[in-house]
Image (cartoon, rainbow, N blue to C red):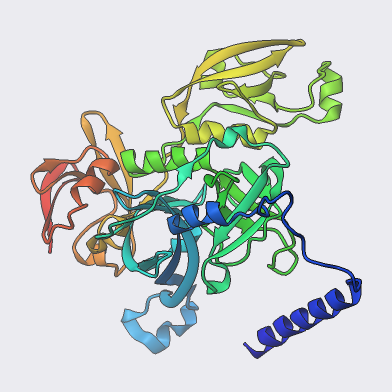
Amino acid sequence: MKKTSLLTLSAVALAFSTTFTALPATATLPVAIAGESLPSLAPMLETVSPAVVSISVEGSHVSKQRIPESFRFFFGPEFDAEQTRERPFRGLGSGVIIDADKGYVITNHHVIDGANKILVQLHDGREYDAELIGSDSMSDVALLKLEKADNLTQIKLSDSDGLRVGDFAIAIGNPFGLGQTVTSGIISALGRSGLNLENFENFIQTDAAINSGNSGGALVNLNGELIGINTAILGPNGGNVGIGFAIPVNMVKNLSDQILEFGEVKRGVLGVQGGELTSELAEAFGYETNHGAFVSQVVPDSAAEKAGIEAGDIIVSVNGKDIRTFGELRAKVATLGAGKKVKLGIIRDGKEKTVTAELKEAALAKTNAETLHEALKGAKLENYSEGKINGVRVASVDKDSVAARYGMKEGDIIVGLNRDKVKNLGDLRKQLEDKPNVLALNIVRDGSTMYLVIR
């Protein structure tokens, strides 16, 4: 802490010294022009700031360590070569209220990852416990619900497809736990991908200062509308150097809608492989455009093949909106969701045409069961559909976990809960919203039906 304070004081001292040296004796503050007041972001921020919250979390990360077999002599028959250790942690972040009536808050997955307690502080100082509705690590989005909260303010959502480089952008969040802080800048670039941050990238780049603790906070336009969720920075030492990234709000909206409907993100898959359209490729294929996603291969029996897309095509738009990179195509298709029909603008042999593809579903991600109910902690769940059985499959169960102690086993298929049918994760999540004291899980195990009672 002393080192931080000294660095801060040094920076302040240098700033004052430079300012007094540089200003001429006749310098004055700007004055109002023709009786008009000076432009200010204050009126907009007074409306928007109550919709941005601070988040603090507590939890533990589980690490596994293998003990050399030679130690079996010391431990005897109870020896277990794989040891687990829980390390407690605390973290800070930000979030944005997107539905005041239902208490829904959007933040980043990495803000709440591993947390067993989530506390949200509003702009006016009120604090509420938050429940994790669901999250998606591959796009770094999480949806929370405030418990017993009222008089909330929600943010208005913009259309991030209409953003342009040079538009003004304002970042609001809780950097370093200092409290709500506002910084401003412009949109520096759009469609950023390939940053090794997460699997599905279509970032807005901004020079508005974003630091540790800003994650999950709001990036808004001059109208106070949400254009993105601040997520990451790029810098040599982890500090702000004017390169920050935010997830576009349209992508966030699609993901949160899927989490609410299905309990998870059902990603759409087009079935193409490719990369960026380089000047060399454009010249080789006789293309004049300098943006789009170059298709090098089409997966057999995929949505792309059925739509008539061929290797060598350039995909330049999705549902009438231009795309700049292959990463942007991949992210947009994924977040639109499985089963959705999408219109794709392509260029082939110098001519532009439009095709329609019905997206297939990507391999299902596994959901941590503890996000549904604490009694299920240690189990990972996934949707299951085979033959006449539809339900939720237990993909794995951690040894010595809460779920394991209650008798849950890998391969169990949950088809009912407390007399209600369970056909997917969305059903299970809805039935667990009221936090019932007793869970009577109707499961299929090794072809037989049984009940597992959890109190």
* Residue at left offset 41%, top offset 41%: 265
Q: Nearer the viewer, residue 104 or 334?
A: 104
Q: Position of residue 187 (x, y in %)?
A: 69, 45
Give the residue furthest to the front: 35
* Residue at left offset 32%, top offset 38%: 261
Relative vertical location of residue 186 with respect to residue 362 in this rendering, above or below: below
Instruction: Say whether residue 271 is left or right of residue 423.
Output: right
Instruction: Say whether residue 428 is left or right of residue 219.
Output: left
Is residue 378 visible from the viewing direction of this image? no
* Residue at left offset 65%, top offset 10%: 353
In terms of image quadrants, where is residue 57? bottom left
Relative vertical location of residue 40 with respect to residue 85 in this rendering, above or below: above
Q: Position of residue 419 (x, y in %)?
A: 8, 44
Is residue 210 visible from the viewing direction of this image? yes
Relative vertical location of residue 126 with respect to residue 71 in this rendering, above or below: above
Quarter containing the C terminus = bottom left
In terms of image quadrants, where is residue 282? top right
* Residue at left offset 77%, top offset 84%: 10
Relative vertical location of residue 92 with respect to residue 101 in this rendering, above or below: below
Q: Nearer the viewer, residue 185 or 63?
A: 185
Q: Position of residue 94 (x, y in %)?
A: 49, 62
Quarter containing the N terminus = bottom right
